[in-house]
């Protein structure tokens, strides 16, 4: 926070805590944002939880399943509710963004079934919410940042093979943000789906895999 303020001295930055699985706290977050900023123009449901360590569903602790589904699914629903309720009272409306992830295309996410199932729900939720707000000035969109080299991703890598895949497909958060943010701010209409890493992009990365070795993680066996 302090570093951001130093980098952007003319900007407004505020912080608060929020448990996204609690409806009253999400409502408080929306009220806090409106109080501090005047209105809520953009809301991004960015809170997410992955499965570490990976394991079959049958061997995953119930508490971990609840935590993943609570954050990714319930948190997104409660956040969307708070955002839409706030934005529809504003003359200018607002833009709500959902975030997809592995599983959003319906592909298998073995050993992370809880996570994948929550992300598979995002395209359907996009269509549902976009239909619900179509007569208002609120719009709902879905963002696919691809594989982003965050601490959450990197600490879950446990094999040389996984490290190679991450090095090939993952991208620095700053690069992804530079591509996504202008599109999110400038989007018009309703129900749009932004994909940073497309199927063609995946192919290109695998064709140039030699240049991507050890970008984020060492691929040596002894590291794991």
Image (cartoon, rainbow, N blue to C red):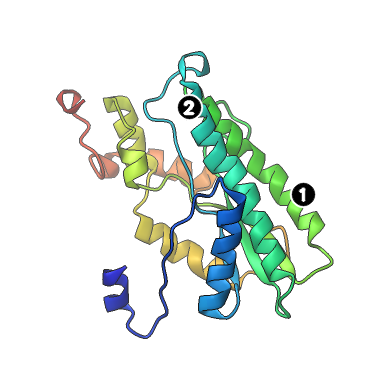
Q: CA distance from mark 2 to mark 1?
A: 29 Å
Q: Is residue 104 visible?
A: no
Q: Nearer the viewer, residue 27 or 192?
A: 27
Residue lying at the far bottom of the rendered structure: 10
Question: From what the image shows, is residue 190 above or below residue 92?
Answer: above
Residue 63: give its label.
Answer: 2
Circle 2: element type: helix
Measuring 76% from the left and 72% from the top, which residue is drawn there?
137
Quarter holding the C terminus is top left
Q: Which callout, 2 or 1, points to the residue nearer the camera?
A: 2
Measuring 73% from the left and 63% from the top, which residue is drawn there?
190
Give the mark nearest the N terminus, 2 or 1: 2
Give the residue at mark 1.
128
Crowding at dot 1, Cα within 10 Å, few <14 / some 14-19 / many 20+, comes out as few
Residue lying at the far top of the rendered structure: 58
Instruction: Tell me where residue 197 appears, x and y as whole percent.
Output: 49, 49
Measuring 73% from the left and 80% from the top, which residue is drawn there?
91
Q: Nearer the viewer, residue 223 or 98?
A: 98
């Amino acid at each position: 926070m302090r570093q951001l303020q130093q980098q952007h001295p003319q900007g407004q930055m505020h912080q608060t805590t929020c448990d996204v699985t609690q409806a009253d706290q999400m409502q408080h977050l929306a009220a806090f944002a409106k109080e501090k900023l005047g209105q809520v123009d953009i809301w991004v449901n960015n809170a997410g939880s992955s499965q570490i360590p990976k394991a079959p569903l049958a061997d995953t602790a119930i508490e971990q399943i609840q935590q993943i589904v609570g954050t990714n699914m319930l948190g997104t629903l409660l956040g969307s509710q708070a955002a839409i309720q706030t934005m529809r009272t504003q003359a200018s409306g607002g833009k709500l963004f959902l975030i997809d992830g592995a599983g959003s295309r319906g592909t298998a996410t073995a050993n992370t079934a809880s996570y994948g199932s929550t992300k598979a729900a995002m395209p359907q939720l996009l269509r549902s919410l976009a239909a619900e707000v179509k007569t208002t000035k609120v719009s709902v969109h879905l963002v696919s940042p691809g594989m982003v080299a965050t601490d959450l991703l990197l600490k879950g890598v446990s094999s040389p093979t996984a490290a190679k895949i991450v090095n090939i497909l993952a991208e620095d958060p700053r690069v992804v943000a530079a591509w996504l943010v202008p599109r999110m701010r400038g989007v018009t209409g309703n129900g749009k789906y932004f994909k940073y890493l497309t199927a063609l992009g995946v192919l290109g990365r695998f064709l140039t895999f030699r240049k991507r070795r050890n970008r984020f993680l060492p691929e040596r066996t002894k590291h794991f």
